[in-house]
Amino acid sequence: MKKIVLSIALAFVAPFAWAQVSETTTTTTTTDANGTITEYTPGSAIVLRETSGPVQYRFGKTVTYVTRSGRTLDEEAVRTRIKVGLPVRVHYVKTGPDMVVDRVIVDED
């Protein structure tokens, strides 16, 4: 009888003892890039002329526009100041093949 109870207990516990635990680690890298705006589509994308050539960046869900001194630009300032020919620095996260911008830093105050 003890052998039967022990066998049933082991049969119940065995799958948990050999279960595999899987763990996934995701690494994100944030980077800055400098260049001059050659194309700008508000809320969608920005293309910068960099030393290596033109590079396209996609905008994330929220993008903050700031001056070099750290002052945040309001919507009106973004509409009037962010345009083709403006030197900027973008802060982005590489997500798969996309470079997703979350901050645009205007090189002038």
Image (cartoon, rainbow, N blue to C red):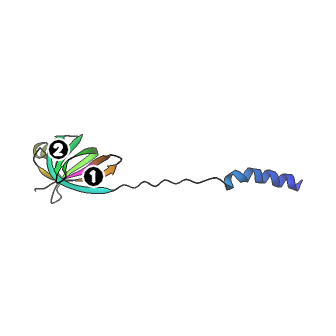
Q: Nearer the viewer, residue 68 or 32?
A: 32
The residue to which callout 1 is attached is: 92
Give the quadrant of the C terminus. bottom left
| Element carrying mark 1 | strand
- The x and y percentages for residue 108 are 10, 56
Residue lying farthest to the bottom in this orientation: 69
Residue 6 in the image, given as x and y percentages of width and height? 82, 55
Amino acid type at image mark 2: Glu
* Circle 2 residues within 10 Å: few <14, some 14–19, many ≥20: few
Q: Which mark is residue 75?
A: 2
User: Relative to 8, is 91 on the left or the right?
Assistant: left
Image point (19%, 45%), residue name: 47
Which is nearer the eye, 76 or 27?
27
Cα gap from disc 2 to disc 1, whole angstroms = 20 Å
Magenta stretch: includes residue 107:
yes
Q: Is residue 78 above or below residue 70?
A: above
Q: In the rendered view, does 6 fall on the left or right side of 79?
A: right
